[in-house]
């Protein structure tokens, strides 16, 4: 009986030891860490094949770096064409012509062209100041949702606030479906 218990205990210990040796190669998307040191396969974009024009007159005039290279990939245009859309409906910045009025209206008081860099720097500084407790860092716990909790929208509280003011909320389910 004792030998059976010892062998069962040894088998469990061996199983735990083997499980501890395994490693997951999957990326941890919520802690923004890469699982390997190799190249990122999503940054590799093949160029279009070179085309030989029918004549020298068919060549476009040189633009000295102002126009994109004809061999460069254009994934937005390619996707629009593949889905049956009109590729000429895009302007140079990738904004549909139908959205030009919206862009003009939202930018009527000026716009910050470096907003993405500013937000990235502010977010990096915020994450440095809120890097978690010692044990959380040691165990590589997920701190993403905890770090941004003060900045997140409390959905139910906001829905109640809008309804109290009489704002129609047709996309939200009625209160009868989810009583408090």
Image (spheres, grey):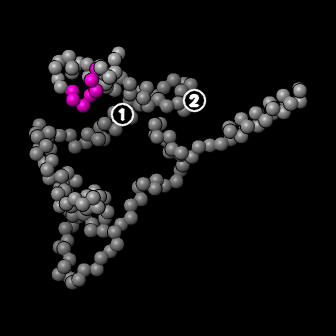
Image height of 55 relative to 75, above or below? below
Q: Which residues are magenta?
A: 169-175
Which of the 4 image quarters holds residue 150? top left
Residue drawn where x is 38% and y is 61% of the image:
45
User: Could you say where residue 3 lies in the image, as x and y percent from the top left?
Assistant: 89, 30
User: Could you say where residue 105 lies in the image, as x and y percent from the top left?
Assistant: 11, 40
- State the residue in front, 20 or 136: 20
Give the side of residue 17 with respect to residue 1, left or right.
Answer: left
Query: Mark 2 packing: few (<14 Cα in 10 Å), some, or many (20+)?
Result: few
Residue drawn where x is 21% and y is 27% of the image:
169
Residue 123 in view here: yes
Whether residue 97 is in magenta: the answer is: no
Which of the 4 image quarters holds residue 134? top right
Residue drawn where x is 57% and y is 30% of the image:
139
Give the side of residue 144 with respect to residue 117, left or right.
Answer: right
> What secondary structure is marked by label 1?
helix
Q: Main secondary structure of the magenta part?
A: loop
Residue drawn where x is 17% and y is 57% of the image:
89
Tell me the CA gap for discs 2 and 1.
Answer: 22 Å
Which of the 4 image quarters holds residue 103? top left
- State the residue in front, 134 or 175: 175
Give the side of residue 162 with respect to residue 133, left or right.
Answer: left
- State the residue in front, 114 or 19: 19
Name the quadrant of the N terminus: top right
**Where is mark 1, residue-wise?**
123
**Where is mark 2, residue-wise?**
138
Give the side of residue 56 with respect to residue 10, left or right.
Answer: left
Q: Upstream in the sequence, badge 2 or badge 1? A: 1
Name the quadrant of the C terminus: top left
């Amino acid at each position: 009986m004792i030998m059976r218990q010892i062998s069962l205990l040894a088998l469990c210990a061996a199983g735990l030891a083997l499980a501890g040796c395994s490693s997951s190669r999957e990326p941890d998307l919520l802690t923004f860490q890469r699982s390997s040191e190799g190249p990122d396969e999503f940054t590799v974009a093949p160029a279009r094949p070179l085309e030989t024009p029918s004549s020298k007159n068919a060549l476009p005039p040189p633009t000295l770096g102002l126009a994109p290279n004809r061999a460069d990939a254009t994934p937005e245009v390619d996707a629009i064409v593949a889905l049956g859309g009109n590729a000429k409906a895009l302007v140079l910045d990738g904004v549909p012509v139908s959205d030009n009025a919206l862009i003009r209206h939202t930018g009527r008081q000026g716009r910050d062209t470096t907003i993405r860099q500013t937000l990235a720097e502010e977010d990096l500084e915020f994450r440095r100041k809120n890097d978690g407790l010692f044990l959380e860092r040691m165990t590589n716990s997920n701190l993403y949702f905890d770090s941004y909790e003060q900045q997140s929208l409390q959905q139910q509280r906001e829905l109640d606030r809008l309804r109290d003011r009489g704002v129609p909320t047709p996309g939200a389910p009625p209160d009868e479906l989810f009583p408090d």
